[in-house]
Amino acid sequence: MKKKRRNRVKQTTSLEARLSLEAQRLRNKAYHMPLGSARELLFRRARQMDEAREMSEVLTLPPTASQSSGRSRGC
């Protein structure tokens, strides 16, 4: 049996940029929809994309001296 090879793609834009663009696309799509649950779902997904972008930015920041000293002792 032949092993399936995984499709690997080199990303040309950062994760933060892709999340931001997707959030913008979802909002634009939602603005053109009639009021209802489908529209609210798109707005919710856009907010989730923004939150994911913010988390990614925070997680990629280098640790500061105050952050690393307080957490190393389990405080």
Image (tube, rainbow, N blue to C red):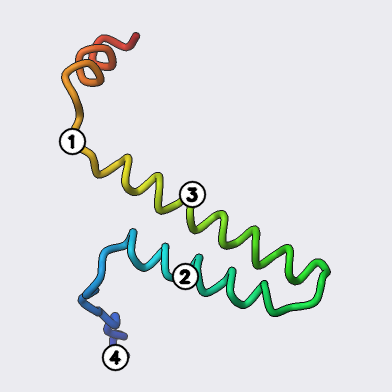
Q: Mark 3 packing: few (<14 Cα in 10 Å), some, or many (20+)? A: some
Q: Mark 4 packing: few (<14 Cα in 10 Å), some, or many (20+)? A: few
Which percent across, then down, holds residue 15? 32, 62
Which percent across, then down, holds residue 41? 70, 64
* Mark 2 lies on residue: 22
**Position of the C terminus by quadrant:** top left
Query: Which amino acid lies under the numbered mark 4 shown in the image of this protein?
Result: Lys
* Mark 4 lies on residue: 2
Which percent across, then down, holds residue 74? 32, 12
The residue that appears at 20% across and 13% down in the rendered structure is 69
> Which is in the foreground here, disc 1 or disc 4?
1
* Mark 1 lies on residue: 62
What is the CA distance from the residue labelled 3 to the residue labelled 1? 19 Å
Dot 3: element: helix
Q: Earlier in the sequence, mark 3 or mark 1?
A: 3
Front residue (pair 35, 71)? 35
Query: Which amino acid lies under the numbered mark 3 shown in the image of this protein?
Result: Glu
